[in-house]
Amino acid sequence: MNKRPVIFDTDPGVDDFFAWMLLNASDQFDIKAVTTVPGNQTLEAVTRNAKGIYKLFNMHGVRLAQGSPRHMIKALDIHSGHGPTGLGNITLDTTGVELDEYRAWDVIYQEAVKAGGELELIAVGPLTNLGIAFFKYPDLKGMIKQITVMGGTTEEGNMSPFGEANIYHDPHAAKIVFDTGIPIVMVGLNALAPCAMTKEDMLKLMPECLDSDVRAVCTDLVEFRGGYPFCDAVTVAAIMDDRFAEWAEYGVEIETRSPLTWGATICDKNGSYRYFGDGDERPKVKVAITSDRVLFFEMFREMFTHYCG
């Protein structure tokens, strides 16, 4: 089976850690690069976390690039439950890990050219880097096979009555991305609740052979934020197995104007919302409606075996 070339755009982040762990353990994906964006913490903090995760998972040969220190228009506003470092209270060893000489948007473009139309983008933080990439390289939208977004919601938000954090923090970038016409998979807040995982749940899934360093980090992270749906890991799981979620296809618009609905993902559920303007010319977004807890836990069980020492 040919592996799917992907770039993972992330703001690590407790749930980003487990998403990265799941992505790296899967035999479906060929990770071409990891790019960092501020969200769960500042760019400096999330890039430090990314370097530590990169080293922990022995990802030599994968490009690691830093993105934008701020969002496209909206001021940087860190409101995070991910702790002082972004990984709870953990500071990982980053010794010997070097960043790519190019910034995130340039790496995205370069890898898209190399992949010949097969590259997928998996974005689990604000969409700033992607927005900049499409703005700087207008021809990029013809080179990307699919964009998977952890963001948005068909129901209520978590940063405002309608705004989910990743979209809320940079709605202008999100609008650029959703307006590209590239096939988009959206895994939002409404799909996450079934996959909440406690420390007790995770400990039951860990095999005895699990690498001790990996075990220690996983245990600390789930202890810090247990009982919480690991949003970004749910997103990776959703594109690993189509059976993982129930899906619907909606037109989706991003709200960038009204302070009452800033960052809302307006989902056209009945196909009659004419404000979208361009009708059927824009591909519908594949939206996750709910997710499968049993399959998610089984994916974690299999994932842990990849990291057995």
Image (cartoon, grey):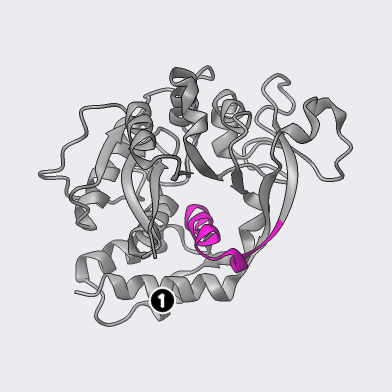
Magenta range is 230-247
Kindly tell me whether residue 173 is visible in this rendering: yes
* Residue under the image location 39 percent in, 33 percent down: 37
**Viewer-closest of 87 and 166:** 166
Main secondary structure type of the part rendered in magenta = helix
Query: Does the magenta-highlighted stretch encompass residue 198?
Result: no
The relative height of residue 291 versus residue 153 in the rendered view (above or below) is: below
Residue labelled with disc 1: 301
Can residue 155 be seen here? The reply is no
Q: Quadrant of the C terminus?
A: bottom left
Quarter residue 49 falls in:
top left
Number of numbered markers: 1
Q: Residue at x 35, y 36 (%)?
A: 36
Callout 1 amino acid: Arg
Q: Residue 154: x and y, percent? A: 73, 46
Q: Is residue 147 left or right of residue 261?
A: left
Q: Position of residue 302 (x, y in %)?
A: 39, 75
